[in-house]
Amino acid sequence: MAGYHNDKDQLLRRLRRVEGQIRGLQRMVDTDTYCIDTLTQVSAATKALQSVALHLLDSHLAHCVHDAIAAGGAEADAKVAEASQAIARLMRA
Amino acid sequence: MAGYHNDKDQLLRRLRRVEGQIRGLQRMVDTDTYCIDTLTQVSAATKALQSVALHLLDSHLAHCVHDAIAAGGAEADAKVAEASQAIARLMRA
Amino acid sequence: MAGYHNDKDQLLRRLRRVEGQIRGLQRMVDTDTYCIDTLTQVSAATKALQSVALHLLDSHLAHCVHDAIAAGGAEADAKVAEASQAIARLMRA
Amino acid sequence: MAGYHNDKDQLLRRLRRVEGQIRGLQRMVDTDTYCIDTLTQVSAATKALQSVALHLLDSHLAHCVHDAIAAGGAEADAKVAEASQAIARLMRA
């Protein structure tokens, strides 16, 4: 089970809302909506995605990384390094 | 017509790809995909959205802002201020 | 003269404040300040730098890009393309 | 001792380099350097600061958060929540 297992419903609701924002963006582009209004919607969708990312990361630290450290051994270091790389990818996205 | 009018097909293709990424994310969450793999997909979708934003902004400067400045008058200053605010929103997204 | 010529004093004040934040960070690291407090200061310095960037960009659009467009010709398109590339670099920083 | 204790020399070297970049920026602004070149230097300094942040975060997870989890108890959850908040601040910076 993934670290976010208990939050799946909330995460799926948020992702469906992002999907709705992306479909809304397609309608906006299709109907030549003013660039700045379209950009505002892109910013909102990006913010919503970043918030999903923070939620996933938080659950990952609280469960997967937590459990690997509590179990001890080399796996713990590997999990921390892997989390750091994911954070780096998010900050550069 | 919006500043991106001539690039609509390309923008719509890109947004449909982002929509596919978001739907892929829902399947990943639904099937308890490992957090880090899910996060990598969130980073990819965020990057794709940012690239749509840069495209919209570029077209906006090249057409709407360009035309307002070429026409002269107070409208030009308002357009530049509005573009600056949109850039600020994108950087803080 | 640069696009930000009339705002030089304000920009220099802000940059000196960022310099102070970076020197403060060196003292924090040197005295083993708690990681999270040090990170909070890094976030603050990054935010201050981003705000300098937005100011520079705004002046650039309002003066350099504006004047190139008002003058007309190929120079205008080059200026817009160059500004778009600078915005892309800032968003990926 | 902070989580980054063993990396202090490297972190201080990097922060001194960022300080040099900020002082360089002041000279650039003072001498009316072209906006785009100044912005490129702001992007470079921001990137260098983000890289310091990732280093601090990595050490924090590998030491402070790691040790709190290994010791067990409520402190572990508090450390994970605190780290998540710091990551959120960095992503919004």
Image: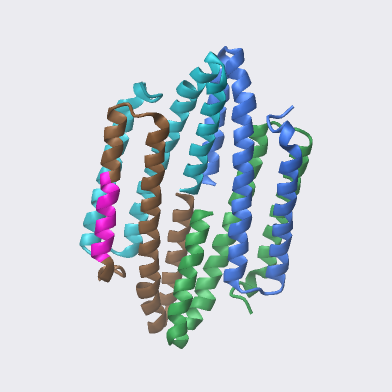
Chain colours: A brown, B cyan, C blue, D green
Classify D10 as above or below D22.
Answer: below
Query: Measured along the vertical axis of the image, is residue D76 above or below residue A45?
Result: below
Helix, strand or loop: magenta stretch: helix
Q: Which residues are magenta?
A: A8-20
Q: Please report the residue visible at 40 percent of the width from the left and 54 percent of the height from the top.
A: A50
Query: Could one spot residue A14 in this view of the protein?
Result: yes
| Residue D33 visible, this orientation | no
Please, is residue C89 above or below residue D90 in the view?
above
What residue do we see at 54% from left, 25% from top? Answer: C80
Q: Position of residue C18 (x, y in %)?
A: 70, 53
Residue at the image point whose x is 63% and y is 51% from the top: C48
Left or right, residue C21 beside residue B84: right
- Residue D71, given in percent of the width and then of the height, sits at 47, 87
The one of B37 and A30 positioned closer to us in this rendering: A30
**Residue visible at 51% across and 74% down?**
D62
- Please state, as top left, top right, bottom left or bottom right, where the N terminus of chain D lies in the image: bottom right
